[in-house]
Image (cartoon, helix red, strand yellow):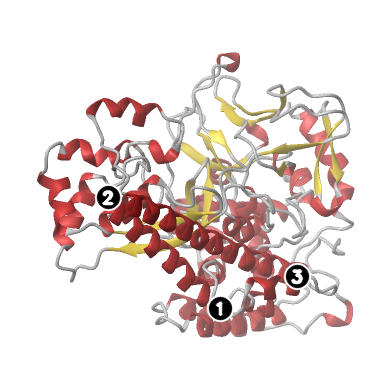
Amino acid sequence: MGKKSRVKTQKSGSGANTVVSPKEMMNLISELLQKCSSAAPSAGKEWEEYIQIRGLVEKIRKKQKGLSMVFDGNREDYFPDLMCWAQENGASCDGFTVTNFGTEGYGLRATRDIKAEELFLWIPRKMLMTVESAQNSLLGPLYGQDRIMQAMGNVTLALHLLCERASPSSFWLPYIRSLPQEYDTPLYYQQDDVQLLLGTQAVQDVLSQYKNTARQYAYFYKLVQTHPAASKLPLKDSFTFDDYRWAVSSVMTRQNQIPTEDGSRVTLALIPLWDMCNHTNGLITTGYNLEDDRCECVALQDYKENEQIYIFYGTRSNAEFVIHNGFFFQDNAHDRVKIKLGVSKSERLYAMKAEVLARAGIPASCVFALHCNEPPISAQLLAFLRVFCMTEEELKDYLLGDGAINKIFTLGNSEFPVSWENEIKLWTFLENRAALLLKTYKSTSEDDRSFLEKPDLSLHSCLAVQLRLAEKEILEKVSASGRDKRLHFQKKLEEGAPLPHFEESDIALLENSDTDAKLPIILRKLEEVEEGDELQVEEPLLNGEKVSFGTEKIQQVSRDVASERMGQTQAPELSANRTEDIPKENSE
């Protein structure tokens, strides 16, 4: 899959175009920036806007053909240099090697037996590409004067990566040469592949990702060409959309948060060698050792010699994997779809319902998750639906009745229904809502399964349809679960079964249970995103903490994780954000 040259231009033979004047290119870039910076399109017009933006990008790409910087040979040719470079700079390299695992792509293969929880991989800070190393590079002067770079560490890393790729003397060249030359994020999809996602929940994130990347590229192209602080950057001579798309995808699929040198805050980093590990189900097993100033990874399980070494990327949905990592994980125990619910302000009982929800720490309007496994709803969603379906008398009881404060604890607990009628109503609502959402798709699950059997299906089309099918399967399970629950509680009502009553002593049960549904609602962190929060194009980091490639802002939240092993100083755990160049793989 290698490309041919790494010098000033890509040798594309007869496909290379005539030289485009700087003025002509700047006019196209300005038009793209204006289009991507205009007001958000009205509902239903997003696809039309995407087509227009993509048309401008393709016009630019055509004029830039043959100008992207590339490397000689194939990616695998550079793996020996990567291992030597890592070993010379203090990384551990004696227990594994880089291997092609076929449909999973490149990964790490054990060269000896490795025990579960054994420390087998560490990468010192000096090998990492970070926002701080960008500030200390040729990019530093521009970083110091550009507020967008200062606000978006991931964009800074992308530009840092491009500048170092263009430098023959870059310290990180062995790492950069080992990266995929193309990715399978939706930024690389053909228009027909993206069209397969129309009607899905994921499509808005895909369209936003493309628009945001195009806007960023246009902004930084103009900045590099005009800002005095960019005069010495290698990007001034050659900075194509394909270059930026590659850099964005490299960062988006690999970025992680690590502590700064003094441990006072977190920063973004690319972690060579460790980012070769593919994903499987499990637990986060990577952390940062501040004392030794290095990333450390322990084995997720026992590995025999020649077995592939996996890590767990985090509790991500397949939409997140496809959009940000470029692969679909078939056995994803954490897959989910979003459902937006809210109490209408015009409803007569709005004030009462909003007050009960507020006491439980839940917004009156919120985006929740429907899960692929049982139970399909979280304690938060159960609590919301119970309040949503309450009668006036039930609301009064939870606001003013005996033990009203303690009753709030039971809202997210499946063992303490408000009433049999309330349970019937909420599960009927969920059953019907999931069924209605299924009707919004233009194809059925059976259609998608037949589509996936096509022998000539492209890899990107396969990813799109797999994701589309996964959304439907979750909604089908939720609807079926709602029906089963509805029938169960109808039987309880018909039989006159006594309603379980909450006692104050039951708080211990709520607090100590391992089951999500039994946790007191106000003692749990609300997992879903509130209305008004950014929902699209976010790249999850550190077990759910997020950094957005979609807007000119960055949200970084430090999550200290205590580690007793080796007397390690508290530091964030790491979860890989990565993909590689073959969509059917986990990653490379």
- Residues at marks 1 and 3, CA–CA distance in whole angstroms: 38 Å
Instruction: Residue under label 3, please give it.
Output: 452
- Residues at marks 1 and 2, CA–CA distance in whole angstroms: 61 Å
User: Is residue 375 something one can see in this rendering?
Assistant: yes
Mark 1 closeness class: few <14, some 14–19, many ≥20 residues within 10 Å = many
**Which amino acid, by three-letter code, is at mark 2?**
Ser
Of callouts 3 and 2, which one flags the residue occurring earlier in the amino acid sequence?
2
Contact between marks 1 and 3 (CB within 8 A): the answer is no
Instruction: Residue under label 2, please give it.
Output: 419
Q: In x, y percent, where is residue 542?
A: 53, 40
Instruction: Residue under label 1, please give it.
Output: 29
On screen, residue 59 above or below 267: below
* Quadrant of the drawing holding the N terminus: bottom right
Residue shown at 33% from the left, 61% from the top: 425
Of callouts 1 and 3, which one flags the residue occurring earlier in the amino acid sequence?
1
Mark 3 closeness class: few <14, some 14–19, many ≥20 residues within 10 Å = some
**Which amino acid, by three-letter code, is at mark 3?**
Leu
Q: In x, y percent, where is residue 132?
A: 54, 41
Name the outermost residue toward the top.
Answer: 567
On screen, residue 110 above or below 521: above
Under circle 2, the secondary element is: loop
Mark 2 closeness class: few <14, some 14–19, many ≥20 residues within 10 Å = some
Of callouts 1 and 2, which one flags the residue occurring earlier in the amino acid sequence?
1
**Which amino acid, by three-letter code, is at mark 1?**
Ile
